[in-house]
Amino acid sequence: MSADREAQTFARQLHQTFANAADPACALAMAAYMKNHFGFFGIPKPLRATLQKPAFASLGRPPSPALLIAIAHKLWQCPERECQYAACDLLVRHAGRLEAEHLQPVAKLITKKSWWDTVDALATRVVGELARHHPALLPTLDAWAHDDNLWLRRTSLLHALHHGKATDRTRLQAALDANLDQRDFFIRKAMGWALRQFARHDPNWVRSYLALRGEALSGLTRREAAKHL
């Protein structure tokens, strides 16, 4: 069976599993929390994890990168948000298996049905792993800091969130500086989050950056960045 056909079967069966567990009242509340950008089955995260576990196990060990990407894209086509969450969980689980060529398919997920709930998982756990293992991708991520798509900008700012002391300070500063004039909440918040997280590993660098850029940084970014200082 081709990866596309297998992915289609997997997505259809998981969608039905979720549909069987739907809770309309919970779905309304979940949709409201997400500003009604998406429809929901109304399945809380713990139950969703339980429901999708057998489906993930059915893929065998290890599923091919091509199949993982195909499944994610099929699940992205489903109208209910839980399917996108399942796709993110699957990619995060197997992020270490992805190759450099899979950055662009992941970027397509980042730029479709975009909101922080899926973008942040893909940025920090999937793109971050790709960047860690495939440094040839770093110039592309640098360029995303200037992209017209705010979610690619956010990904550029957040992809190294879990790189710890190995974070490339020059690249982090370049991404931050590229977004100093951005007024979007999600960009300003990401800038603060990136600085706040890195302050756990190099607080002096973060203090120096805050002093260097001063009032050029938004109040939101400064407040977030200083939470662990």
Image: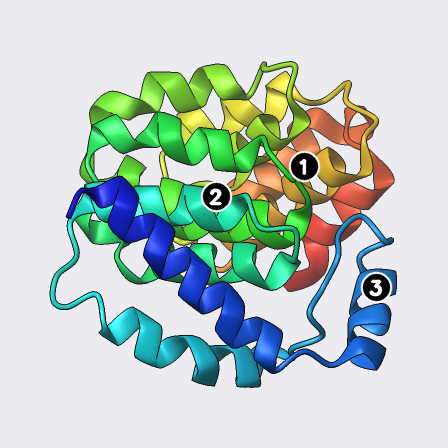
Name the residue located 45 percent from the left edge and 55 percent from the top edge. Answer: 88
Which labelled disc corresponds to residue 33? Answer: 3
In the figure, residue 65 lies in which quadrant?
A: top left
- 147, above or below 162, in the image: above
Name the residue located 45 percent from the left edge and 85 percent from the top edge. Answer: 50
Amino acid found under the numbered disc labelled 2: Ala
Q: Nearer the viewer, residue 72 or 148?
A: 72
Residue pointed to by mark 1: 210
Q: Nearer the viewer, residue 189 or 53?
A: 53
Residue 151 rendering spot, x and y as whole percentages: 62, 32
Alpha carbons under labels 1 and 3: distance apart: 33 Å
Alpha carbons under labels 2 and 1: distance apart: 24 Å
Q: For the residues carrying marks 1 and 3, which lies nearer the camera in this image?
A: 3
| Left or right: where 191 falls relative to 91 | right
Q: Residue furthest left?
A: 61
Mark 1 element type: helix
Dot placed on the residue nearer the N-terminal end, 2 or 1: 2
Q: Residues within 10 Å of mark 1 (few under 14, many from 20)?
A: some
Q: Residues within 10 Å of mark 2 (few under 14, many from 20)?
A: many
Whether residue 73 appears in this view of the structure is yes
In the figure, residue 149 lies in which quadrant?
A: top right
Amino acid found under the numbered disc labelled 1: Leu
Residue pointed to by mark 2: 123
